[in-house]
Image (cartoon, rainbow, N blue to C red):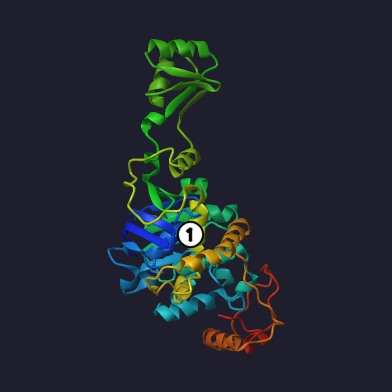
Amino acid sequence: MPEGHVLEFTGVTKRFGPVTAVDGFSARVEPGVVTGFLGPNGAGKTTSLRILLGLIAATEGTATIGGKRYAQLAHPLQTVGAALEASSFHPGRSAANHLTVYAHAAGIPAARVDDALGAVGLADVAGRKVGGFSLGMRQRLGLAYTLLGDPGVLVLDEPSNGLDPEGIKWMRGFLRELANQGRTVLVSSHLLAEIQQTAQSLLIIARGRLVFQGSLGELTAQDEYATVVDAPDRAALVTALTDAGLPFEQLRTGLAVRGAETTAVGAIAAAAGIALSTLQRRGPALEEVFLDLVNGVRVHESALAPPSGGPVAAPEAAEAEAGVAEEAAAVEPEEPAAESADEAGTTDAPDTDTDPDADEAGAPEAEESTEDAAEFGPPAPTWDADHPTTDADVEADRFFSQYDAPAGDAAPPADAETEPDAEPDTDADAEGGEQR
């Protein structure tokens, strides 16, 4: 059984030029539960996770997995499975071939490819080209990659994106099952309702700072809850509560009784012979509490004292600037290894910050890209068979061909629904062989 590890952020700060994307962030993620990582766009979630996975270096502080930095892990893919964003898939290659390349590179047995695809429900389409996959199927393939090494830690960013209602329901149960096996499951999302139905523990971050950590039950104080009760004979109910000495507030939907549990209120009504039409415990909605926390209206005791960091962006521009900073982290010219490390998850990038002038020059394009991705989702990879073949194409095909299945491999079911495949780009394609 895979062993979960404690994820710990200690005073993590990350600055991109004049922008502080993460400011003294400290938190602890325990194994055995699904932990939701919440925050508005540009709050610093992705930057924090990139630091945890060694894709960028923190300006200050540390982020560890089982007490070790990611670069110190002996077997990274067997320890941590991570999917921070929509992965890039070669559309001319099959799902099984895509995972086989990673398994070979990490020294993982090839049998794990079928196990991972089966776990996410893609076993029947293992031989189909990724170019014909829907967004939801691509999302499942990205999840299969995180499971390839059977790791004890899973770090996922928006894992339900692109899934249909049935797929979302499956994802909830799947993540809970992984946590029940003792794994550490950290899920970043901005969908409050989805996290509420999936996670048992929460981390909420705003403007790069922790504003809450704890269980869902600890998110609101007990005195914020009230028992709402009503009856066809409301006058008799008012009399019974008054005689019992319970203060209440009259609402359009009934009576709100504070300081009393539903069992106590129900017992009072039963003793008075009053039939109830409503009896429920009600508190502030998660959305209301979340907005109060990130806007600074509400301060929870679990949040640490404000850290002393570098220059922080103005509050009204913090989300936009931090969003640009997170996008810049993926394209910083000083960090050439970051892109490949994002996909393979095995390389630690050098500790360099983006040049302030370069950051400002690239900001508009990054913002536009971020907004487009938020509205329409990541663009699907394209494959133009009529495009002239380049030296890079030839080299890529030569590399992938060593993992291709023999031409006699079984073909996908004839009734499988898929988009038209690209024109053959290798000899195996021309002969009708499946790409494995």
Q: Position of residue 339 (x, y in %)?
A: 48, 73
Residue at 37% of width from left, 32% of height from top?
A: 222
Toward which corner of the image does residue 47 lie, by quadrant? bottom left
Q: Position of residue 221 (x, y in %)?
A: 37, 34
Residue at 46% of width from left, 70% of height from top?
A: 342
Q: Position of residue 172 (x, y in %)?
A: 49, 53
Toward which corner of the image does residue 418 lie, by quadrant? bottom right
Q: Give the position of the C terminus as an image quadrant.
A: bottom right
Q: Nearer the viewer, residue 169 or 35?
A: 35
| Lateral position of residue 17 relative to residue 426, left or right | left
Q: Which residue is mark 1?
A: 157
Q: Position of residue 60 (x, y in %)?
A: 33, 62
The residue most toward the left is: 67
Q: Amino acid at mark 1?
A: Asp
**What is the number of callouts on the image?**
1
Residue at 50% of width from left, 52% of height from top?
A: 319
The residue most toward the front is: 357
Q: Give the position of the N terminus as an image quadrant.
A: bottom left
Toward which corner of the image does residue 365 lie, by quadrant? bottom right
Q: Nearer the viewer, residue 271 or 278?
A: 278
Q: Is residue 21 visible?
A: yes
Q: Is residue 182 visible?
A: no
| Lateral position of residue 153 relative to residue 393, left or right | left
